[in-house]
Amino acid sequence: MKGIIVTGHGNFASGIESTMKLIMGEQEKTVFIDFKEGMTNIELSENIEKIVKKIGEKGVLIFTDILGGTPFNEAAMISTKYENIHVFAGLNMAMLFEAIDCREEEIDTDRILEESKNGMGIFKIVEEISGESDSDGI
């Protein structure tokens, strides 16, 4: 089983952790690292690398909040030192759930990204063209 690390600015990671636990329960080899105000990029990098060494014997998926942000950049630098580390940016819950579901298999990064896209949408109210309604209520 591949390890999973979630990191991001502020309380991004701990917020994702809270949601994940509510929906999926505690997950083995899944660690959340907040990049809090006052923390240096070196401290963040050391925290990420320590976890990679602890849970990464079969590989690690690292998920971050913003492409090009400090958590992403530090994770990307760490990934150059180890084999079988994949770094993603723009984490949403659909992406994380897919990663958790498929981390026992060979990692298909395209599949994880596609599920992330499938998890996005927008609600729009569509007005009837005729202005008349067949319904007797709401």
Image (cartoon, grey):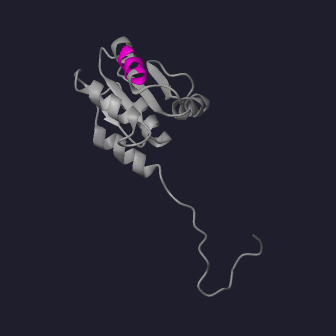
136 to 101, vertically: above or below: below
* Position in image of residue 8 (x %, y %): 47, 34
Q: Nearer the viewer, residue 22 or 60?
A: 60
Q: Nearer the viewer, residue 55 or 107?
A: 55
Question: Left or right: 4 with respect to 123?
Answer: left
Q: Nearer the viewer, residue 109 or 17?
A: 17
In the image, what residue occupies the spot 43% across and 51% down?
A: 118
Q: How many marks?
A: 0
5 to 110, vertically: above or below: above
| Residue positioned most to the right | 137
Quadrant for residue 26, please give it. Answer: top right
Q: Looking at the magenta stretch, what is its main secondary structure?
A: helix
* Position in image of residue 133 (x %, y %): 69, 81
In the image, what residue occupies the spot 61% across and 78% down?
A: 127
Q: Residue 47 colored magenta?
A: yes
Quadrant for residue 132, please give it. Answer: bottom right
Q: Which contiguous range is marked in magenta?
A: 43-50
* Position in image of residue 112 (x %, y %): 35, 40
Question: Left or right: 131 with respect to 118?
Answer: right
Q: Nearer the viewer, residue 76 or 53?
A: 76
Question: Left or right: 63 with respect to 136?
Answer: left
Q: Residue 120 colored magenta?
A: no
In the image, what residue occupies the spot 51% across and 31% down?
A: 13
| Residue positioned most to the bottom | 130
Q: Quadrant of the C terminus?
A: bottom right
In the image, what residue occupies the spot 38% across and 18% down?
A: 46
* Position in image of residue 76 (x %, y %): 29, 31
Q: Quadrant of the N terminus?
A: top left
136 to 83, vertically: above or below: below
